[in-house]
Amino acid sequence: MNAKPFIHFDEVTKDFPRPDGKGTFTAVDRLTFDINQGEVVAVLGKTGCGKSTMFNLLAGLIEPTSGRIDVNGHDPFKEFNYFRGRIGIVFQSDRLMPWRSALDNVLLGLQILNKDKKESEAIARHWLTRLGLSGHENDYPHALSGGMRQRVSIARAFAVEPEILLCDEPFSSLDEMTARDLRQEFLRLVRQNNKTALFITHHINEAIDVGDRVLVFHRPARIAFEARIDDASRQSGRKPIQDEILKVLSLEAPAATP
Amino acid sequence: MVIRNPRLRQAAQAAASTLVMLAAWQVASFFFPEYLFPPVQTIALRTFGIFSDPTLLLEVLSTAARIFGGLFGAFILGALLAVVIGRSPFIESYFTPVLVFLQGIPALSWVVIAIIWFHGIEFRILFIMVMTTLPAFTFQILDAYRSMSKDLFEMTMSFRPSGWMLFRVLIVPTIVPGILTAWKVNLGNAARVVVVAELVGATGGVGYQLLLQQQLFDMAGALAWTLVLVLFVLVVQTVIVALESWVLRYRPVSERVV
């Protein structure tokens, strides 16, 4: 018998009012999937397919129109405060506060959690060092490169010791080399710390590199294809999976403006 | 000679234009009677006399206290209103038309209204100062509040802060530049309004002293009191600019200069 999934989406739908005020459009359509504890799931889909809406639903930032989201037995929207410190998010852009130094940005989550100041500073310094930013603690974001800023945002997410990591195309704004290095580093940290992670991307190779499983979304967000990935398929069996994903993605009509 | 340091060059240009103005005045004083164009040295002596006489200095300080009292009152009320309006479009639809209407009322009308409505001189002046600067404070802080980054808001909310913590870590740092701009803009307005209020409804302060000089037909005295008020505004502006540079030290130098 399978263990109870850590994250469970059950027939989740999210509708938004149309900008012209006439009716609604559906961003997520009866979406159902599970993620087990310690699993890393990559979500792929074209722009506008509802990945980010699904992401915000899981983060508890918006409420589903219908259906149920269960994260370790709790509803992330209705039990918003329960998840304080339990969910860490790495966004597409670094979203650093420009008025805070690198160290203070990493301290943000710990400050919100009301952790002891000295202990928090030690934790923040530890994560900055692990991400190769030792010596840049007092630099303001404008003085850091794009890669360094994204490292700070990863440190900020890890510093609160979350149970779940949500990543929304975190390396897409970086150059190829920096993105590759940072991705490897990020994955190592996720595995070492046994985090459950959901990783949104629109790069097929990145999804295969990152995920234990890859979910391919069609618009409005619903699963069109699912593949389990292991080391063998990453090395020798990558091509058939890539082809299959490409085929599934090409079946979808281009996104229309809502 | 070319001055390469931009600050030195700016100071030299300001000094040059001031010298030209003083020289033009001095030339005029040779051709016109003293009660119209008193010599520069007479005005300087009278100005120095205000600073060296404790009784006269007290008049300046009482005007300064009225300016600060009025600005502080308007700032507190304006900040509260801005946050309330910013959080509720419903409240905004009621308050904004009132504030726009208040903004259109001339300072002199408020002076007349205050004299008819209230007996206490200090309360009259406080009322006039608050009513004339409140709309500007509210709109400037509201603009700053509205310019709050949606990305930073979402990022901060992902840590699930309490309302107070959200205010501390995001809202305050976001609106501080707007608050400083509002103080800079309103300081000049407040200095003009306080003189009108004192001129009509007070028995002390710079405005009252100006009224006395007019009755004595003493141009040197009128200019000396005016100069004192201008110097006061310049000194406070310099303090605010220095405070602004310190608070916004996280910005790149190019942005700070802008």
Image (cartoon, grey):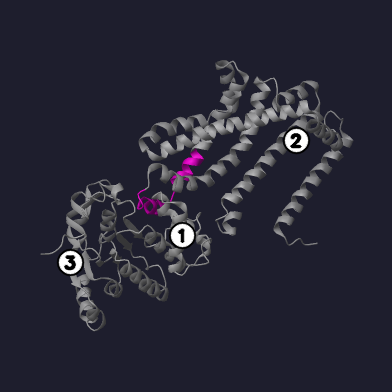
Q: Mark 2 and mark 3, same subunit?
A: no
Q: Amino acid at mark 2?
A: Leu
Can you see residue B229? Answer: yes
Q: Position of residue A106 (x, y in %)?
A: 44, 58
Q: Which mark is residue A224?
A: 3
Q: Quadrant of the N terminus of chain A?
A: bottom left
Judged by depth in the image, the label closer to the viewer, 2 or 1, is 1
**Residue designated by label 1:** A122
**Residue B48 in the image: above or below residue A45:** above
Nearer to me, B82 or B197: B82
Q: Quadrant of residue B225?
A: top right
Q: Which mark is residue B227?
A: 2
Q: Position of residue B37 (x, y in %)?
A: 83, 33
Q: Quadrant of residue B51?
A: top right
Q: Where are the magenta residues, as a range?
A: B139-160
- Magenta stretch: includes residue B140: yes
Give the spatial CA distance, label 2 vs label 1: 55 Å
